[in-house]
Image (cartoon, rainbow, N blue to C red):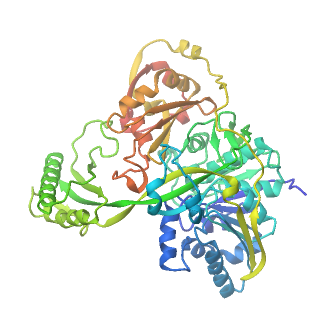
Amino acid sequence: MPRTKTLRIANAGGYWGDDPYAMRRQVQGELPIDYVSMDFLAEITMSILQKQLARDPSAGYARDFVTQVDPLLEDIKDKGIRIITNAGGVNPKACAEALFAVAKKRGVDLKVAVVGGDDVAPKLATLALDNMETGEALGDYRDKVLSANAYFGAMPVVAALEEEPDIVLSGRVTDTGITLAALIHEFEWSPDDYDRLAQGIVAAHLIECGAQATGGNFTDWEKVSSYIDVGFPIVEFEPDGTFVVTKHPGSGGLVSLQTVREQFLYEMGHPQVYITPDVITDFTTMSLETDGENRVRVSGARGREPTDQLKVSTALEDGFKSAGTLIISGPDARAKAEMFASIFWTRLAAELEREGLTPFEATHTEFIGDDATHRGLTPEHRAAEILLRLAARDHERSKLGIFRKLLPGLILSGPGGVAVTGGAPHISDVVRYWPSLIEQAVAPASLGVYENGEVVLERENLSWPETGGTMDPPGGLDDPHPTSILGALVGDQVEVPLMAIAHARSGDKGDTANIGLIGRSAASYVWLREHVSAEHVRGWFEGIVHGEVHRYLVPNLWALNFLLDESLGGGGTVSLYTDAQGKTYGQALLRCRVLVPAKLLETIAAEDRPSGKELS
């Protein structure tokens, strides 16, 4: 029978390396929890795990997950909490075996379901795998492939939950799928109940990155009462698909309309075409309202039929890189740092020439502490000290060897006032992210269920629901905020940074950064809509953006979403930037100064006005 009461799903991790004690706080907190979801797999994580597996057949999964679950096994069993996670990586069966080992030591009976089948690397010879962003064919890169995994949606996890396990382990299941699966299973939603599925995707997107929904990375961080013991997000779902996002009472952090709006825009592409294997969701139809302290209710998301394809994340070997730093003190810290950089690159070029080697394929210099991440958007100031960062990338490792040997020699052979930050730089592998699409039938899911290490069930070739949707955006957009709102604001103009009328959040997808710019009032949104164009953002980020800038309206969130193509130096591990994921770009945009009607500032509620020294 479908569930008829509220279902609580708690997130306990947004990436491999997130707060190791978040699961404990979620399991042992005041609110009773039904499910815990955890996402461990970024785009390049699978290649890292694949390398670990090649060295050790018992590796290939997120070992931290086992460490976190171990001391909580009794609590999880006593409270009937189920855990769903993609911590299985490229070897979920080994992860299950590790769980059984710690459970046996504690005398806890454990039932684990394992979802597999996402690894398509053995099928590379039969797959085209053209890059879905550039159109480039995989072709000659095939021998450089480290891993290739299809993104599964919720359905294989739903099949696993039907066997009533304590823990579901998977490989590459979408970060939204691990949360949506619990909703489909408990409420018995049909695979074509697209509006309810869309609500599930909206909730999953909101909580998948952990504390970013509860005050983490928040523009108005001063309004968060405490970042100690931050409460991770919890969604309370009703059978009709509406939900409240909250956190455990008494925990740190903040859940408000503003923190939720920011997180909805995080890593957003086209807001009307949020694509998953389960449903294509329109984020412009949902409504938000405050539902009490640290509670926001969300309703109204709309969904439509997904495509019959799965995304494949392929990781390719793509050379090597290295970066090193020196601390340069004042007076004249910037001038000294520029001199050090010039000395180093000149010496390095001469040494490469002596060795008969070509110049580096890419180099990058950053003056951290003096506009390294915002690059030209920061008010001028004089840095007391600078962390000089020098980086290089190439396919010839020997060049990086020369780079790492030369850098420490700067300490005693340049201007004065230099401090060291460590030894010689480390040389690391560059892994290129290669996204593509395949037909669902190419990657059927598998399921194994094990109880205390013994096989209970094994199934192959789990079928997918038949679908045939398209990725085309729907026609039209309902924007209920008329331009006439600005008519009442005629009068004196004042110059302010965008932060005075907006807050923001930014993220990445490959070499594209997104910036969600959110008005602090309905009138602020209308002003942003009429005055901040893609061309404006392109101009402000000149020198950072080397591709197009696209703008999308999200009127229900009072927001604009900007996509900045070719803005991250290649993105991921290819990039030589300190901020290779665009995390600082939203704050950079908020520093841009604009002329606005003085009366516009009066439309912002007192509790939503920002504070800070840079607002004048």
Q: Nearer the viewer, residue 33 or 313?
A: 313
Residue 315 x/y as whole percent: 48, 59
Q: Nearer the viewer, residue 485 or 286?
A: 286
For the question of whether residue 32 can be seen, the reply is no
When asked about the image quadrant of residue 32, the answer is bottom right
Q: Nearer the viewer, residue 330 or 119?
A: 119
Residue 296 x/y as whole percent: 67, 43
Residue at image position (33%, 53%) is: 576
As displayed, is residue 196 above or below residue 76? above
324 left or right of 79?
Answer: left
When asked about the image quadrant of residue 82, the answer is bottom right
When asked about the image quadrant of residue 347, the answer is bottom left
45 left or right of 237?
Answer: left
For the question of whether residue 530 can be seen, the reply is yes
As displayed, is residue 177 above or below residue 199? below
As displayed, is residue 98 above or below residue 308? below
Residue at image position (68%, 41%) is: 281
Residue 602 x/y as whole percent: 51, 23
Q: Quadrant of the N terminus?
A: bottom right
Q: Quadrant of the C terminus?
A: top left
Residue 157 x/y as whole percent: 73, 61
Residue at image position (43%, 31%) is: 498
Q: Count the marks: how many?
A: 0
